[in-house]
Image (spheres, rainbow, N blue to C red):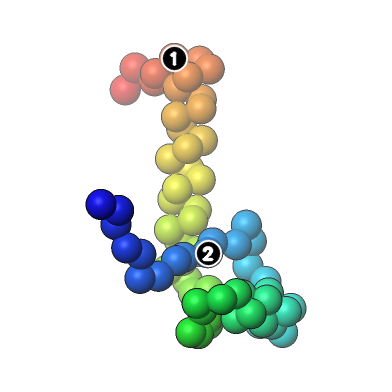
Amino acid sequence: MTNRLHSLTVVLDHDIREDDAEPILNAIRMIRGVIDVSGNVASSASYMAEQRAIEQLRGKVLDALYGKDPQ
């Protein structure tokens, strides 16, 4: 038996203007089975989460390249 999905999430590689995203939203709406699609407005919270994730990844890469910091 297979699982049934009720929704899908699409993540963009960078923030884009709402009017520039309209063709993408329209294309997704044209896919069979799609009821609706909407965009999520970027906020300071999403920016902070992205920066924290980047910093965490940066730390892991540096640890892998140069060894863990002895602190």
Q: Where does the image place residue 50, in percent across and percent down from the top left? A: 49, 56
For this rendering, which residue is in front, 28 or 53? Answer: 28
Q: Is residue 40 visible?
A: no
70 left or right of 54 in image: left
In which quarter of the view is residue 56 placed? top left
**Side (left or right) of 28 relative to 34:** right
Q: Which mark is residue 21?
A: none
Q: Quadrant of the C terminus?
A: top left
Tell me if residue 65 can be seen.
Answer: yes
Nearer-the-camera pick, 10 or 46 = 10
Q: Which residue is mark 1?
A: 67
Going 47% across and 71% down the picture, which residue do you hit? 44
Choose between 2 and 5: the one closer to the eye.
Answer: 2
Point out which mark residue 10 bears. Answer: 2
In percent of width and height, residue 69 lies at: 39, 20
From the viewer's perspective, is residue 27 above or below residue 1?
Answer: below
- What amino acid is found at the position of numbered circle 2 in the picture? Val
* Residue 27 % position (x, y): 68, 76
Instruction: Give the structural element (helix, strand or loop) at label 2.
Output: loop
Which comes before the other along the chain, label 2 or label 1?
2
